[in-house]
Image: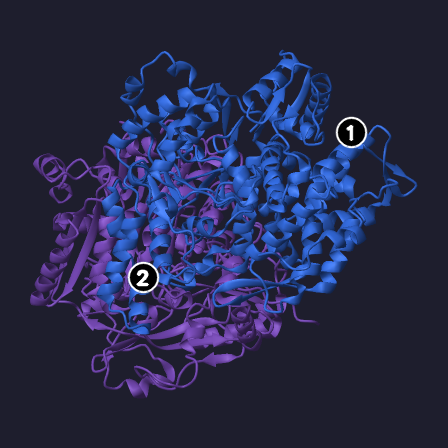
Amino acid sequence: MADHGNKKDAKSRRFETILGHVSSNDGPKSANDKDKVQLKMKKCGEVKSVISKHRQEVLKWNGWGYKDSKFIINKKGLAEFVGERYRLSGMVLPSLVTWMEKNTGGDIQHISPAQPERKPEDVPEPVTNEDFLKDVSELDISCSQDPLDREFHAHGHTLHEIFILREGRFKRVPDIVIWPGSHDDVVKVVRLATKHNVCIIPYGGGTTVSGALLCPEEETRMIVSLDMSQMNNILWLDEKNLTMCAEGGIIGQDLERELNLKGFTTGHEPDSIEFSSLGGWVATRSSGMKKNIYGNIEDLVVHVRMVTPRGVIEKNCQVPRMSTGPDIHHVIMGSEGTLGVVTEVTMKIRPLPEMKKYGSVIFRNFEDGVACLREIARQRCAPSSIRLMDNMQFQFGQALKPQAGSIFTSFVDGLKKMYITKWKGFDPNELCVATLLFEGAKEEVLAQEKRVYEIASQFRGLPAGEENGQRGYMLTFVIAYLRDLGLEHYIVSESFETSVPWDRVLDLCRNVKERLTRECHEKGVQFPPMNTCRVTQTYDSGACVYFYFAFNYRGLSDPVHVYEEVENAARDEILACGGSLSHHHGVGKLRKKWLSQTVSDVGIGMMKAVKQYTDPQNIFGSNNLITLEKAKL
Amino acid sequence: MSRPEYEDILEGKRQYSDLGFSMEAYDPPRYKHCKPRAPEKVKEDVLNSTRVLSVIEQLATETDQSEDDLLSQARAMVEEMGHNLRMRSIRFFAYFLNKIFKALYKRIYVNGDDLEKLAKMSKDQPVLLLPSHRSYIDFLMLSYVAYCYDFPLPVIAAGADFMGMKFVGTLLRNCGAFFMRRSFGSDRLYWAVFTEYVQTLIRNGDSPMEFFVEGTRSRTSKSLSPKFGLLSAAIEPFLTGSVYDITVVPISISYDRRLEETLYARELLGIPKPKESTSGLVKARSVLQENYGNIHVCFGEPLSVRKLAEGRIDRSIHGLHPRHMSMFTSEEHTFVQHLAHQVILAQQKYMVISPWSLVAAVLSQHPQGLLLKKLVHEVVWLKKQAVGLGAFVNWPAKADPSNIVKSALELHHHVVTLGANGRVVLNLPTPTRPKMETEMARKHRLMEEAEVRLMVVTGTNQLLHVFVRVALVLMALSKDGSQTRDELFRIFGFLRRLLEKDFIFMPGQDKQDFDTAVQYLSRAHVLEERGGCVGVTDSGKKLQSFLHEMFSPFLLGYWTMCQYLLTASSDDPRGSTTQQLTRGAQDMAATLLTNGLVKRFEILSLDMLGNSITSFVSMGAVKRFKSNGHALFLPVQGEIFSLSKQIETIIAVPDLKTAVQVIPVKSRL
């Protein structure tokens, strides 16, 4: 099987500027028995992915994102974002270093380098099930036992995992990586794994931040990492019903690019869209920033095929809704790889919007901003995305301002800054910004924009320009790269999220920040941590809040442990304030200990019962969500 | 917190003008999340709150009142309630209090360092100031101290009975007092308005909030059982995550001599208290001519509600209901009760025991008075015992003990006199000729004598919390002085339960209390193990008998109530009010005293007799029920009889046969 990734593709820009190539293959890939029902549908082709089969060729082995994109400190001691993929690429960010030093108490001169490139001998020897290997080799399915392939599949992107890559080694990694090419391949592999009692951990985009991909250290069976990346075809597109069907391994940006070329979009844009996969979205109940128009994954999914040790689970029709007992989709969505692997997904699509417009509003303080978002949600006129950043995040955005470039001139510059702060009396240390993204027909967008700004003005909010809005969304993708820069300088950082009823948003934000600060102090962190949040998603009855949190760990012997304790305390605080265990990151292993208090013991019992029936041997043995007691032999 | 370091805040002010003091710069720290608002805005916020509006809506559907009517009722309530804290008034009040305090008191001691630490903490979370309450002076004391230390002035929950006082009511309001009705039982609207008023102040942390956990002034100088309502309301914002934490500060205010001593003695005996009025206060001006010694204000170790709740309370439960609906889980109820007890126990811990209290304790065991030399000797011994148990006694190390005692006597010259013969006697009324005396006159004379004796008793009372646990252990030992540990604990448990209303014990901690007391007594060589039994050593006999004398009046009072319930009220199956019962028992006590059958005047205290009823109810010896909205009580004869018998195994009581002849069959009330 050929590798799909090539350098030219990998350089293609994302979302706003669609530069992807057109797939040349006109004939549909044979989707087996489905051919007949697809006659009236648009034919689709094989998708060439930006990401290569051996991911380490394009992606960092021990950090976030593309190998060629990262923050560095240049010779002048200034931060610079190198590479060519992003708008910010190649730009110098003159105030970033000062900002980091000021807000984490660090010093950019202090360096905590990562260990050099991994040597194959540092990766644990594979556990081998010879019978399984023999049977698999007869299948003509691509696989690898190369140590670097195996290690790449051993982790997601929690701080803990990245720290291990930078400074330690994993005790347990997958023993083999298998790249199935089709649904049928998956059925065969799962059947063999069940026959030979081999553990499977499905691998989509590898962007998990819940520890879901970590191999249980106590697992003695052979572990297969089932890498779905080669199952990335769009199988068909149905304009009449506005649906499309794709294989589970397709990466978000590839899917979106291909659909855009045909004039459609799913509208599902999680922040990880560059790297995360369709099957992963389903398995974790993901959420996209434009859910106000398009809905979250549970609203988008029309049909799912999942291969389990017990067989294939799917519905027999593709209908908008049905009343047929508990919805099996809701057993599949959020199963986090514990029941089976998602091979094919039919999803709603929409024609590309006529117009896309960014916007922003500044508020005097976070309270006003939250009240405004609440009102917009109440009136159900939220644009496709609306996010409210607190003051710290606003300032952070300012610190990420490059030296030049008209798009980056900020409204707080010069006269505008004077106007806002002196004339209008906004306190630069209190004000906060909401970023907006409108999508739709031109008149609709303009009308909606007017309405939103009118509501904002009731909460003393002032429009702050399109550029600021656009910048805000662009930064989301870049910020993920910042953690690696921090780690080079004794700064650990992480993000976490929750959902909470409207009336508790402010209290939750305040209490969680307070808790973070106090816990850090108590745990011996020498400088006050940087903590900031944004209301990143609005609903009728509540909101999703996203926290960024960083601290300088100089002087701590076990920073990851301290970090975990602090994050645990923050999660306790979230729950005490009426927040949820997770809005969209999922549970994995990281948040398992709170699941029974979240869904009740009976809820856990139900999950166990489903697992027990579907996968009694624990073939899908990632041990996410729940731990099944070992069956008596 | 170790031993508090005190400084006298009056010292610097004696040479300084009151006006100057009142014009000093005052710039206290503020809670970091506070959004400053005027008192009127607070009231507005209360009326616009979901809590109040939703109750109005409910009441409008359930009753025939209109929402407008209910809203104006709510407005009237919040107007009646609201404080009006203003800088101008603070300055006036600083001037006024400075003058008064300098005139009344020699020194006002405050542990200023701890207060300064507290000021720093007050930036991080809302603060509850919970002082002990034994005098009217408490009410203004903290505000005065706060002003002196640049600490934010508290808003103070006050009983609505102050409101009626014309000028004073307004002044208090302007100084931060807000008023709560003493009882508003099932008035849901009032409850909603009041709760919201308290909670909005705490959520926004406008000012520290001061209130008295005991609910009212303790006339007896003993701590009162805590009330939970206001504390629950004040803590709730933490439980619902509306604030990160709340700092609770137990504060002990100790007096050498209280302004109201005479008044209280009369009240305890049931001589009616004049209604709070401005003219009454003016009449009390003669009170201001006297010297009242020192005051100690001790800010105790601040308690973090969050830390106390850790692992005990799952706050996420409040995610399941709207936050304007108050819902307390049983764990939270228990938590608030424990917190309230913890506060009172902390207040007791940092109370400063005045020498008068020791003098009074000795005097009350010598009804005929005693020689100064003997008194000093006894007082010094008692002081040693108290200090051993961790009490802070105001006893200058270098001073001559007899001088300390003499100045204590001097300070209480209205109660005691040191005669030229060196004998210390109480200022008892001169006896009339017994032959001529009618029963009424006899009772009147008894009450006059009781008034003086009760002032000595309230002096003693300040000391009781120090000894109560060890005293109960020693009393639980049989007369011959030996008991198995289990039996000892059983009787200790009985006494602790019986006296629960008169003394403050942490609920559920009887074993710890017992063990700590026994451990102390063993270490102090008062108790020793003898062949599996516990007994008093020879050297411990003195302490045992002293404490027995000190605490037996309570048992005698309870016993008297038993006798009363066994005789007089038993024939009224419709039940009696507390007042009828306490008055009846008081009459019986008076008869026992006039006939010389008992010697202790404490048993005339309506407070103690009332406590006995409460205690009997919780022990199941008296049944409580409601009739026409009044609480009525009915004794359970068998239980009362057995209680009475148990008490008789612990203290000596008059011979019942003799007693029965002198006791009237029916209550005179």
Relative vertical location of residue B10 with respect to residue A525 in this rendering, above or below: above
Q: Nearer the viewer, residue B154 or B651?
A: B651
Q: In this view, does B253 lie to the left or right of A413?
A: right
Circle 1 residues within 10 Å: few <14, some 14–19, many ≥20:
some
Colour-to-chain, purple:
A
Palette colour of chain B:
blue
Res B525 seen here: no
Viewer-proximal residue, A90 or B272? Answer: B272
Which residue shows up at 62% across the image and 49% down it? B586
Percent from the top left, x then y, of residue B56?
A: 29, 64
Q: Is residue B666 above or below residue A470?
A: below
Residue A75 at x, y = what percent?
Answer: 28, 28
At which x and y percent is residue A470?
18, 51
- The amino acid pointed to by label 2 is Gly
Q: Report which residue position mark 1 lands on.
A: B524
Name the front one of labels 1 and 2: 1
Q: How is the image coloured?
A: by chain
Residue placed at 69% from the left, 64% from the top?
Answer: B636
Q: How crowded is mark 2: few (under 14 residues within 10 Å), some or many (20 or more)?
A: some
Give the residue displayed 21% in from the left and 79% down from the top: A239
Above/below status of B557 relative to A609: above
In the structure shown, which secondary structural element does the residue marked by tag 1 occupy? loop
- Residue A573 left/right relative to A443: right
Measure how far apart labels 1 and 2 are at the Cα level: 63 Å
Residue A542 is tagged as: 2
Residue B12 lies, with reference to residue A241, above or below; the image says: above
Quarter holding the C terminus of chain A is bottom right
Label 2's element?
A: strand
Horizontally, residue B141 falls left or right of residue A481, namely right
Task: Say which amino acid is labelled 1.
Answer: Ala
Q: Where is residue B405 in the image (x, y as percent from the top left)?
A: 63, 18
